[in-house]
């Protein structure tokens, strides 16, 4: 029976075997469809982050991608043909000739009946096995991240393993517009709490600056009167 798919250790072992120039044999599992139980050879391991079907298997004349759940490591000796003993031809036993009468008078030979024998040779054609159609690889996933840290809002973008935009600072109003597109109550509440804390801190700083400015204005007025 086909196995339950490749484990992470088996995938690592196949990757090392490919690096050494070998092409390990695998057997298709039940999740591979009608080709379950058939044997193929792994010829390549692509990037698993791009597609979950990163195990490229040669089956017949085709090289198709499968997921680790579709194949399992083939047991030793799988795919070898065992020579079958040839049957010995049967020994023909001599048949006794029918006894003929010693004397026959006025014997008329019976007409011979010729039977036409038509031999039909039917060439058995192997049934076509359904091969799992290869899925076209789509573009890598796109991730856009809105983050808040140390009093600043930043936005970053990444596609797959490639960074499209490094984190850059955006205004709080722009951050609110982005969050408004996300219909999740918990997110809105968290953003409102951050904004409220920032407003309170800004108001405290403004009051402090106003008080310092009033003191400076008063000192400047005193200095003007002392002329």
Image (cartoon, rainbow, N blue to C red):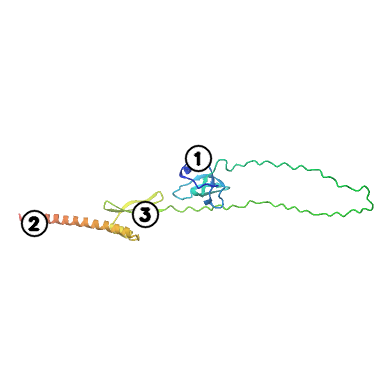
- Picture disc at residue 190: none
Residue pointed to by mark 2: 221
Q: Of label 3 and label 2, which has the lower sequence position?
A: 3
Mark 2 secondary-structure assignment: helix
Distance CA(mark 2)–CA(mark 1) = 87 Å
Q: Give neighbour class at mark 3: few <14, some 14-19, many 20+ (Cα, 10 Å).
A: few
The quadrant of the rendering that contains the C terminus is: bottom left
Q: Which label lies toward us, 1 or 3?
A: 1
Q: Residue furthest left?
A: 226
Q: Nearer the viewer, residue 37 or 158?
A: 37
Q: Position of residue 57 (x, y in %)?
A: 53, 47
Q: Decide if residue 45 is on the left or right side of residue 150.
A: right
Distance CA(mark 3)–CA(mark 2) = 55 Å
Q: Which label lies toward us, 3 or 2?
A: 3
Q: Position of residue 213 (x, y in %)?
A: 14, 55
Residue at the spot 28% in from the left edge and 53% down from the top edge: 152
Residue at the spot 50% in from the left edge and 45% down from the top edge: 44
Q: Are marks 1 and 3 in contact (CB under 8 Å)?
A: no
Q: Decide if residue 165 is on the left or right side of residue 60.
A: left
Mark 1 secondary-structure assignment: helix
Q: Decide if residue 106 is on the left or right side of residue 197.
A: right
Q: Give neighbour class at mark 1: few <14, some 14-19, many 20+ (Cα, 10 Å).
A: some
Q: Nearer the viewer, residue 65 or 164?
A: 65
Q: Give neighbour class at mark 2: few <14, some 14-19, many 20+ (Cα, 10 Å).
A: few
Distance CA(mark 1)–CA(mark 3) = 38 Å
Residue pointed to by mark 3: 144
Q: Of label 2 and label 1, which has the lower sequence position?
A: 1
Q: Of label 1 and label 3, which has the lower sequence position?
A: 1
Residue pointed to by mark 1: 17
Q: Are marks 2 and 1 in contact (CB under 8 Å)?
A: no
> How many numbered discs, if any?
3
Q: Position of residue 119 (x, y in %)?
A: 75, 52
């Amino acid at each position: 029976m086909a196995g339950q798919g490749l484990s992470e250790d088996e995938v690592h072992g196949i990757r090392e075997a490919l690096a050494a120039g070998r092409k390990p044999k695998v057997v298709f599992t039940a999740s591979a469809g009608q080709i379950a139980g058939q044997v193929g050879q792994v010829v390549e391991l692509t990037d698993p982050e791009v597609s979950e079907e990163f195990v490229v298997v040669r089956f017949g004349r085709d090289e198709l991608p499968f997921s680790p759940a579709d194949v399992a490591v083939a047991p030793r000796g799988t795919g070898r043909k065992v020579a079958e003993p040839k049957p010995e031809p049967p020994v023909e036993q001599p048949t006794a000739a029918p006894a003929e009468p010693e004397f026959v008078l006025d014997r008329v030979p019976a007409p011979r009946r010729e039977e036409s024998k038509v031999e039909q040779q039917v060439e058995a054609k192997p049934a076509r096995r359904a091969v799992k159609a290869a899925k076209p690889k789509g573009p890598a996933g796109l991730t856009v991240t809105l983050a808040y840290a140390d009093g600043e809002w930043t936005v970053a973008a990444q596609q797959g393993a490639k960074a499209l935009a490094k984190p850059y600072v955006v205004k709080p109003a722009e951050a609110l517009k982005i969050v408004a597109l996300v219909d999740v109550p918990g997110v809105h509440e968290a953003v409102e709490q951050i904004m409220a804390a920032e407003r309170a801190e800004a108001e405290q700083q403004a009051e402090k600056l106003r008080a310092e400015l009033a003191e400076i204005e008063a000192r400047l007025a005193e200095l003007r009167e002392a002329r």
